Every structure is written in C-alpha cells, then in structure tokens.
Image (tube, helix red, strand yellow):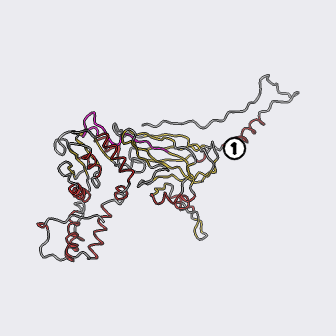
Amino acid sequence: MLKTSLPDQSQAVPNATAEGLVQRAQSEPLTDGGLKTSQLLAQALSLDPHHHAAQVLQERLHQMLVPRWHFPMLADTARNQAYAKAIAAKVKPGDIVLDIGCGAGLTAMLAARAGAKHVYTCEQQPLIAQAARQVIQDNGLSERITVLQKWSHDIVVGVDIPEPADLVLSEIVDTVLLGEGALATLTHAMSALAKPDARAIPERGVLKAQLIESPQLLNQWQPQQAEGFDLSAFNRLANLAQITPSDFAACSMRPLGAATDLFQFDFANPSIDPGRITTGLSCASPGKIHAVLVSFEMELAPGVSVNNNLQSEGHWGRTAFLLDDPKAAQPGDQMTVTAQHDAAHLSLSVHEAEFTSQAAVPAMIWAKQTLSLPHQQGSSVATSSSPKWHQRKVTPAENRGQAVH
C-alpha cells in the first residue's frame, strides 16, 4: 500500500474522531487529485490504525489514482539496470535534465547520481508527485531534484525550469511504444523545453511483428465453447489480446518465424506523422499460426536497450492480434499484414485470405503445367518452336508499402 504523508499539524482537524474524518473524506471531491481525501484518511488512521472504512477507502483511492503498473516496473531489475547504465553514460557534469513522468522518482535520482547539476521532473498526478518528493527527500536529493506537479506541455522555460534542458529523460511508453502519448510529448519537449543539441533517453525505438503459435493464448482469449455451448460469435469482441506478464508465462508462445520491423521512431527528433506499412511475415518452422505478436526494442544509449520480445522477462506486457481462422503453416509460408499508427494508437490487420502456403505451390505449378502442355503433332493449331511452358519461380510476396518513420 502506498504510504500517504500525514498533513501538517496546522491542517489537522481539532478534536476530530476517526469516524468523523472518514465521513468527511467520503464527501470530499477529488478535483485536487485526491490530496485532501488522502490527508483526511491518513489522519483517521493515525487516530485509529485499525479503522476498517478508512483502510478500505485509502486502498480504493490509491488503486484508482496510482496505476498498479508502477510497482512491478520499479521491481524490474533488468529495466532499472539498463536505465542506470544509459543515464550514467549520457549525463554530463553540469547538465540540466528534464525527466518526464516522475513516478517514484527513480530515473530522476539516477540522473542526479550521474552528475546532473539539477533535475526537473514532472508528474501531473498529485498523490504520485507528493510521494516522489518524499522518496527524493528520504534519499537526500531534495536540493538537486525539483518535482513539478504538472503536465510537461504546461512547463514554461524561465518559469518552471531556468533554462532549456541538456538532456530529456523519459519512460512514458506502453507495450507498443505509443499508448502513453510518448511521440507527442517528446515532440513538444525536444522543440520547446530542450536545447537544440539536446540528448535524449531513450534515443530510438522499433516496433516488430512475428507469427506465433499458442493454443493457450487462443483458449484464454477466444474460448470456442463452454459446457457444450458454441461461444464463437462472442469471440469477435476479442481480436486484440493485451497480455500481462503472468499471462505471458502461462501462454507458452512459440515463434514460427523471425520478427519483422514495422515502424522505427527517433525519440531525439520525434515526429507525430502517421505511419502505414503492408508487409509479409514468414514462417521458418512448422506449426499453427494463432496470432501476430507485436513487440518493441528501445535503445536507451549506444549498446543499452530494453525490449518486450519473447525472450525478455520483467514487467512489460505484450500485445497480440488474433487470427479469425488459425492457419496450419510450413517453413516458407507467409502471412501478409497491414499495420498503421496515428502517433498514439496502433492497429494491425491480417490478410488471412492472402495466406501463402508453400504446401499448395507444387499442386498449383502442376496444374499450370498441365493446362499449358504443347499440342500434339497433327493438331489443327499451329505450334511454335519455342517451349509452350516452363516451371514458374515462386517468390514470397513483396512489401507493398514503406513505413513512414
């Protein structure tokens, strides 16, 4: 449970009872981001640590306003070590660092430890900003880190930060890099809040797609029947699977081919232009295609990266697009997909009707050859001295579009 700092004694309600404070908390609007409600509940629990309603309401408040992914993210050792290494490599003595998305303050403290002159970190959720200030104070870094309780788009150079930043630091991506508005946020930050030659962490990212086999994933997201009843019509409502780390561990996903790049993003020189690509995903091993998995790789600094591919561990979730009709596949088979993004959301459609199966190629070639055999001698149709048929070379489908980024 997230600890809430107790209010100053000057703010404490004199002669208040725990029950009265809880009743006030229940009627308090959340227009301040939950700060007053949190203070009242903290006071109630200081008077009666076992007050049931105060405990329930405090936990409900924290779960509603502080996303739960913060905690497994902070426990992700590989992610933390990668950021620590990248920050140590890119922060220079005397740097002004802008850290977007403060959270618990970890990346801001890493930047201060790496030698930044001062770190300005922004967090628009008041309860998170309050907790981050306490964490930073507990670690003796309050003099070198300022927590700005606002959205980065509202930061003004000369008012909130003394000068443009030398380095913009962030970790505001989701499982497909786009969902937390990273591109729009960083486009504004790098142009309005940073020096022209400012550095960035992360530097770049790439989205990839690959064909996977996982009966467990299909059974979890599209159960075909239950107790003898056909449920297939209901499954049209679940074509996209948002896979948690625990679901990922249980689904035993098997790659059927290598991952193919979809889009590349430059976070140091970001763009909010949309992107579209149509490309083929190839099979390298036999199996059944159940879904297209989309994963990312982010380069934080040269030689330092994080990803959420099939081999990675940690707190990252995954995104998979389920086929309507799973396909049996052999090496050399290919599935065409079209991926699009608007700098904030990703869509992907599978061209299931265009599935190219190499198993069908010999039969197709034989049929073409039979239909094109030269006429027998004596035929009323004139024949040419050149062969009437030849074995056609079958090649994989070419890319039918290029990624914008």
**Residue 47, position as x, y percentages in the image:** 19, 75
Q: Is residue 153 visible?
A: no
Q: Is residue 240 above or below residue 160?
A: below
**Residue 155, position as x, y percentages in the image:** 22, 45
Q: Quadrant of the C terminus?
A: top left
Residue 76 in the magenta stretch? The answer is no
Please tell me which residue is depicted at 22% across the width and 60% down the height of the picture: 32
Please tell me which residue is depicted at 20% across the width and 56% down the height of the picture: 137
Query: Which quarter of the figure has residue 389?
Result: top right
- Stretch of the chain drawn in magenta: 190-208
Residue type, numbered disc 1: Ala
> In the visual, does 142 lie left or right of 327?
left
Please tell me which residue is depicted at 26% across the width and 49% down the height of the picture: 108
| Residue corresponding to mark 1 | 360
Q: Is residue 405 above or below residue 64?
A: above
Query: 10 Å neighbourhood of mark 1: few (<14), some, or many (≥20)?
Result: few
Query: Which quarter of the figure has residue 215?
Result: bottom right
> In the visual, does 265 lie left or right of 237?
left
**Residue 127, position as x, y percentages in the image:** 25, 60
Element type at mark 1: helix
Please tell me which residue is depicted at 43% across the width and 36% down the height of the picture: 404
Total numbered labels placed on residues in the image:
1
In this rendered view, identify the residue nearer to me: 388 or 130: 130
Q: Main secondary structure of the magenta part?
A: strand
Residue 206 in the magenta stretch? The answer is yes
**Residue 394, position as x, y percentages in the image:** 66, 35
Query: Which residue is outermost to the right?
Result: 378
Q: Quadrant of the N terminus?
A: bottom left
In this rendered view, identify the residue nearer to me: 326 or 75: 75
